[in-house]
Amino acid sequence: MNRIRLLSEQVANQIAAGEVIERPASVVKELVENSLDAQAGRVTVEVQAGGRSLVRVADDGAGMSRDDALLCLERHATSKIRRAEDLAAIATMGFRGEALPSIASVSRFTLTTRERQSQSPEGTQVVISGGKMLEVKAAGSAPGTTVDVRQLFFNLPARRKFLRTEPTESAHIQHYLALAALAFPEVAFTFQKDGHLVWQLPAIRSGTDTPARLAALRERLRSLYGGEHSLLPVAFSAVIRSNEPAGEEPGSDPGPQTSNLRLWGFIGAPGVSRLTREDQHLFVNRRPVQNRGLNFALLEGYHTALMKGRYPVCCLFLEIDPAAVDVNIHPAKREVRFHQEGEVRRLVAQAVRETLLRLAHGPQTTDHGPQTTDHGPQTTDHGPQTTDHGPQTAVRSPQSSVLGPRSSAFGPPPSVLRPPSSGLSPASTTPAPSSRVTPAAAVPLLNVPLRLLGVVGRLYVVLESDRGLVLLDQHAAHERILYEQMLNRLERNDQAPSQRLLLPETVELSARDASFVREQLPVLGRLGVGLSEFGERTFLLDALPPFVKAADPRRFVLAMLDELKASGLEVNSLRLGEQMVAKTVCRHAVKARDPLAGPELEALVEDLRHCAMPYTCPHGRPTLLEMNFRELEKKFGRTA
Ligand code: ADP
Ligand code: MG
């Protein structure tokens, strides 16, 4: 008996829908991608009941002829690729030719479309229910395409049951739409939910160069999220050299193949992070993607500027030769694979790191590798040269007087901590613009003069700048300074200063801990921790770095070892062991509540200014917090 038979078209479509259409947000995604592929200038999305009862996507794109309108509903019908080879270099969002027939097989579906090119005012309307064609007719419509998807999964009760609550499904839809809107600022997006207007994002015209695209993206970010975000612009490009042989035939060029990589967008300033990856938006050739390698690259790039277990905030666009990336590995096209994963990862980490370093030092100090090119100063104007609020020329906002005369009751008389670079360039009298979304045009905090006001809680140093109030975590700042000094010494192969203990102490450890410590002895020694073997499980502690003011040196060593063991479990091969040890030593060296005198505090700020990553401690916690006058005014109810 023959038991194998070909599935009907309708069943095949429903099976495909199982992969491509998970939930209403997938419908929105597929339809919006089609609109974008059709060169739409305006996309309107309307949903009802979290997309369960209605998803409508209307565009003013190319539209379709009557024949195409019928063909597009066939499985494997697409205008975007022709041959298998085209899969190797996909430049459109869609290419599988599956979305429309899949959606139409699991919903009540109406497609209305009119070709933009055609002169006739008449379009075509196709009505399908659960994959069955009910009607095809001529219909008057504006040029473009509108797709109505009603009662998703009405014919698949099991799938319908898996849908979440309306707010959850709406949130998924909104999340995807935000990504699409970020990737296409030149397209106007409207989003309506249950009859209410959620967004009306105007099209932002811009040039194609990176500064223009950054400006457009910034504006889109602002209209989507508003509020204050400390974001830094990224503009990086490099050449990837392929290690694959170029050609086998004799006489062909044996040189390495190259492809260009560009990374641009915004990343959170040091200290800005989230508990989830929710605000981490990554795009590859404008497609929102998930890719483990890119996630790691981001974390690596941030390195000590990110707290453990926290995630960066970013909106980054990676542009790469379509032939260097495979987008056909996930039915919903959510994931991509790079042909040279390691190289892409390394360059992305480098781009992030350079951006963070540039924050502290301006563009002139970064050392570009031979591959990196377009770090145009126009996109990276963090340099101290852009504005110099010297104390004499600074334009003070009148509100600063509410702070009253600076009281000397806090301790030392106020003094002006000048940035190391002040006076390098003619001072401008324009105050830094208080940009809402990103300080792309603002001067980094440590490049403006800071006046010392006092200390609260014996830990938080209160400072004032021309922009408002600044708080410095004395402990975190000290840790950062020590850490960078240690790393510099390690790099130069210098022995750190070390102070002999009056009374050497012995430290006894378990067999396992003893063997762990034995491996760390050389690094510890170079950092100034004099620990040597004194028996099988016993160590002699006879020196400590001078900055360690531990009352109980033995406990200091034990606590440090615990921490080292814990960090040793952190699997991240790309971080240097030495750096980890240094990080741990300073954490245990710096004691929070040491009272510091005025000159010491000034020295602290000055030392911080010379750090490569001054805005976070080595564990990613912020060293400085700024509350500008705008925020103060808001808090005191002076402005809305
Ligand atoms: P794919 O996008 O992978 O090609 P789809 O099933 O999503 O597959 O769409 C099939 C075809 O229908 C597309 O290739 C395109 O030619 C046409 N199409 C779909 N949506 C639109 C639209 N909004 N405007 C113009 N053409 C469209
Ligand atoms: Mg499509």
Image: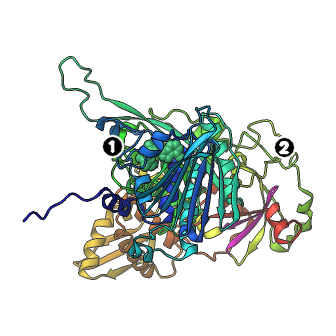
Question: Mark 1 or 2, which is nearer the eye?
Answer: 1
Q: Nearer the viewer, residue 567 or 503?
A: 567
Q: Residue at x 63, y 42 (%)?
A: 41
Across and down, in percent, residue 525 comes to: 37, 63
The answer to which of 564 and 506 lies nearer the viewer is: 564
The residue at which mark 1 appears reads as 340
Mark 1 to mark 2 CA distance (whole Å): 47 Å
Camera-side residue of 457 and 262: 262
Residue 4 quadrant: bottom left
Task: Confirm whether residue 339 shows in the render.
Answer: yes
Q: On screen, 137 above or below 401?
A: above
Asked if residue 319 lies in the magenta stretch, the reply is no
Q: Which class describes the residues within 10 Å of circle 1: few (<14), some (14-19), or many (20+)?
A: some
Secondary structure mostly seen in the magenta stretch: strand
Q: Quadrant of the N terminus?
A: bottom left
Q: Is residue 621 above or below residue 190?
A: below
Q: Is residue 133 left or right of residue 432?
A: left
From the viewer's perspective, is 410 left or right of 343? Answer: right
User: Where is mark 2, residue-wise?
Assistant: 430
- The kind of residue on which mark 2 rests is Thr
Where residue 570 sits in the image (x, y, percent)? 37, 68
Q: Residue at x 50, y 49 (%)?
A: 33
For this view, does 496 lie left or right of residue 398? left
Whether the magenta-drawn stretch holds residue 464 is answered as yes
Dot label at residue 108 = none
